[in-house]
Amino acid sequence: MTLYRRCFHRRLPRFVFERTLIYSEDVEKETSMAAFQRFATGASLKVQGLVKPYGVAVRKGKVYVTDSAQSALMLFDIPGGRFKEIGTEEPGELTKPLGIDISPTGEVFVCDVAAQQVFVYDEEGVYQRAIGDRSIFKRPTGIAISPDGSRAYVVDTGGVDNEDHRVYIFSAASGELLSSFGTRGIKNGEFNLPLQAATAPDGTVYVVDGGNFRVQAFTPDGKFSHSFGSIGRLPGQFSRPKGIAADRDGNVYVVDTAFGNFQIFDKHGQLLMFAGERAQVGSPAKYMLPAGIDVDEDGRIYVVDQFFRKVDIFRPVHLSKHEGYAALHEE
């Protein structure tokens, strides 16, 4: 499966499908000794996997996926060849994890909409601390860490019965609430059921303004910069935008659950390409309920589908499948 970008009368390949993650065995390889022991004892092969994935964040080949049905964070360590559940016990036990992001130092930040907190773990899943509480959040669903790791931007979706549709800015290290921006509305800088957020290398904060069918861009301090998108069914428009990510070049990736695809925009909101479509079978780039998305250091794209309970991975055409995170395990 190859994804193309339209360029005048030519179709230039940009990404190629690499693999799908669903089960622990997609990264774990059973050793010959373990296989022999299992055969000798009659034990069955234990396979774990995704049930209702939502958000995804990736760093150096470690793919972290929130699973709201299993109340856990799933780690697919591709270069390390291992699978691990995180947040299944106190302290730091998760209830309904949704949004997720990773700091430059490897700390993993997870929004728990039921606990109304953000839980922070180290890269191995050891609980570190919590940010915010019920006195601040209504429905924290999305989080983005600033490029320098100093700030955590937490999206509070709010609800139909309140005006608390906003983004909170915290110190990522101390958890101190620094400020917030937004309220319910349709004007620039206002939100209607915001969902996810992402930060670009220049510090710009992009927020999916779901109920207004657009993406809004803000300065690091929360001042409105610009927006793009509108309701519709044409490329560059949105029907049900949800997940968002930004790459190292500042391009913005937006998942649309209703379209069953993701669209890629430049930093000004100009559409570059789109990929994926709704389907009844979850083959590569076929989606029913796509949700989260992330782009790693090498330009690989990771797309979560809740219905098909999978993470599709696409790599840039110039990158071989042995480059990037695969090389990390060999170092």
Image: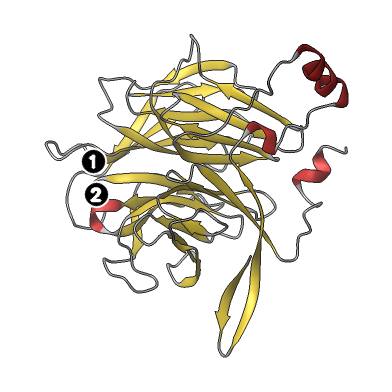
Camera-side residue: 5 or 186?
A: 5
Quarter of the figure with residue 193: top left
Image location of residue 305, percent across then percent down: 47, 47
Instruction: Determine which residue is flagged by label 1.
Output: 165
| Residue count near mark 2 (Cα–Cα under 10 Å), binned few <14, some 14–19, many ≥20 | many
Image location of residue 68, percent across then percent down: 41, 30
Residue at 49% over, 41% down: 309
Quarter of the figure with residue 256: bottom left
User: Does the residue at mark 1 contact the one at mark 2 (Cβ under 8 Å)?
Assistant: yes
Q: Relative to residue 252, is residue 190 depicted above or below? A: above
Disc 1 residue type (three-letter): His
Helix, strand, or loop for circle 1? Answer: loop
Looking at the rendered structure, which numbered label has been put on residue 191?
A: 2
Camera-side residue: 208 or 88?
A: 88
Image location of residue 14, percent across then percent down: 64, 69
Residue at 50% over, 11% down: 89
- Residue farthest bottom in this picture: 9
